[in-house]
Image (cartoon, rainbow, N blue to C red):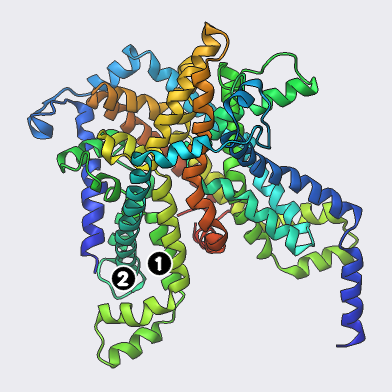
Amino acid sequence: MLVLPVAFYLIFCYKPMAGVVIAFQKYNLFKGIFGSKWVGLDNFKFVIEKMRDFPIALYNTLLLNMMGLIAGFPVPIILAIMLNEIRSTKAKRLSQTLLYLPHFLSWVIIGGMVLQIFAPTTGVINQLLLSWGVIDKNIPFLTDGIHWQITYTLVGVWQSMGWGTILYLSAITGINMELFEAAKIDGANKLQQVWHVTLPGIRGTIVVLLILNVGQMMNIGFDRPYIMGNPLVQDYCDVLSTFVYRAGITNAKFERATAIGLFQSVVGLIMISLANLAAKRMGEQGIW
Amino acid sequence: MTTQTAHVAKEKHVHIWTWQQVVLVLIIFIFVLSCVLPFLNVIAISFSSNSAILRGAVSFWPSEFSTAAYSLIFSDKSMIRSLVYTIEITVIYTAISMVLTILMAYPLTKKRLHGIKFFNFLAVFTMYFSGGTIPIYLNIKDLGLMNTAWSLILPAALSTYNMIIMKSFFATLPDELEEAAIIDGANDFQVLLRVYLPLSLASIATITLFYAVSKWNSFQDAKYYITSRDLQPLQLKLYNIIKGSQAVDVASVEGAGSQSLSSSVSESIESATIIFATLPILIVYPFVQRYFVAGVTIGAVKG
């Protein structure tokens, strides 16, 4: 039974893992891995010393991930707690359904909508703010560096809030109802119940998601920055994934791009292990 | 019904719309609006005339109603072909993925499997470490899959995350089922096919949905592996349309000043294309979303 899936893992996951050795070679596409010359750490040195875009991409990756974590992590927790308090089942179900709709859409579609809605002149947000007199000139949501980064972050929060809310809601439903009853009898008001019962009750879920997020700090998807980015904000939207694509696939500097990828994978693995260790020290379950 | 329960029910009904409830619902409503309004805006633009878009008269309702953009899309044969092609790829991918996922997940729930720890590690390790973009790209090249539909189907055919969800479902079914079937003379494949799969239809539906949505939405693989125009899936095609019109937008910011007519023509076409590519998802969404919730929840418990 295992033959097919194991073959899949070997061919499409482990074979590329062996392929990382070209990070230590002067890779020649025609000679392949076995014919190319070994150069030790030269590729890493070149990337760090000579490639101007590398530190920028690294910094942007960490910055955008950090911004996303700070702005986006609490939102689903708050939404889930609020949704849980809503007593009308219809209102609850309808809002849930609509909240995680964005999660079903591709980044191309979301990116296309973002480009239209935040467009400098014809975008609906600038138009409305102008006509209401809130602003007197267009906000450069997508054409100025800092504005772009904030827009990028908020779109990310928007896209993922519904999905996170499902997770926390199911964690909240898992809390023993008697705890709430007991708190009520002890005279706790709604806020105190949330603080002393709900939040401790979903602590495990919060910690696991936090570990996963911190462990993913070095990883950034390709679709979102690539689609939302534009040449005007190049130094603000360039991240490791888009940089690797440009260096490796567009410019065919395979060994250097592989070196960056390897650096990213190794640091990522270390980070997730550390985050997991920290969680276990704090007495939580962790992810392995 | 006793008087006590009647009393409780009545009390519940009285308390359902307290002012706290109204405030809560209003706050949630703002978040919900943020998920709905963008669609309305894009739909409105797609049905509006160019001059109205240029004047900035379109917000959430079409102005000077026009279906020109849609008739253009539907008359574009390459657009329809791309839609059909994307559906084909999604169906084949999902079928292959399900077979691989089930064949991996099921044995991993059997303690008698030799080397179960090894196989488990083989799968889970790939969640935390990968060869990286370029070695994966070169691998596709080596295998001769560049510019074939297979490059969109095979490389991501098995998602370890989905496999773990499937596995945790199989693990909830009692072992006695298998023992009984084996006594009746069934082999492993027959047990899986005749006993386990019929009991797992709900979770199979969930995982199928996960795979289908991820393939329908995937963009990166097409961007990397497909250069031939005829093999572009819908997302890549949409991307090219969007980027084409954005170039005009950016140029108008950079100095050219007023917007040219061509940019607003592409604005309504762009919106119509976005809606065109979203429609299939929006149509199936109401029917499948409860499976989605179930899947996310299982994944979280296991997570």
Residue at mark 1: chain: B
Chain-order first, disc 1 or disc 2: 2
Residue name at image x 74 percent, y 62 percent: A90
- Looking at the rendered structure, the secondary structure element under dot 2 is helix
Residue A88: percent from the left, percent from the top? 79, 62
Is B25 in front, or is A73?
Answer: B25
User: In terms of image quadrants, where is residue A168?
Assistant: bottom right
Chain of the residue under the numbered disc 2 shown in the image: B
Query: Where does the C terminus of chain A fall, quadrant-wise?
Result: bottom left
Q: Quick check: can you spot residue A152? A: no
Residue type at mark 2: give it.
Answer: Pro
Classify mark 1: helix, strand or loop.
helix
Image point (43%, 62%), residue name:
B207
Please state the horizontal and vertical placement of residue B240, each as a whole percent of the image. Answer: 39, 30
Q: Amino acid at mark 1?
A: Lys
Mark pair 1, 2: CA separation: 9 Å
Residue A122, position as x, y percentages in the image:
62, 23
Q: Can you say whether A1 is above or below A215 in the image?
A: below
Have a look at marks 1 and 2 and say if they share a chain.
Answer: yes
Residue denoted by label 2: B107
In this view, B113 is above or below A140: below
Q: Is residue A52 above or below residue A277?
A: above
Q: Nearer the viewer, residue B92 or B293?
A: B92
Task: Tell me if mark 2 has few (under 14), some (14-19) or many (20+) residues whose alpha carbon lies within 10 angstroms of its own.
Answer: many
Would residue B169 be found to the left or right of residue B93 on screen? Answer: right
Camera-nearest residue between A6 and A232: A232
What residue sits right under mark 1 in the picture? B167
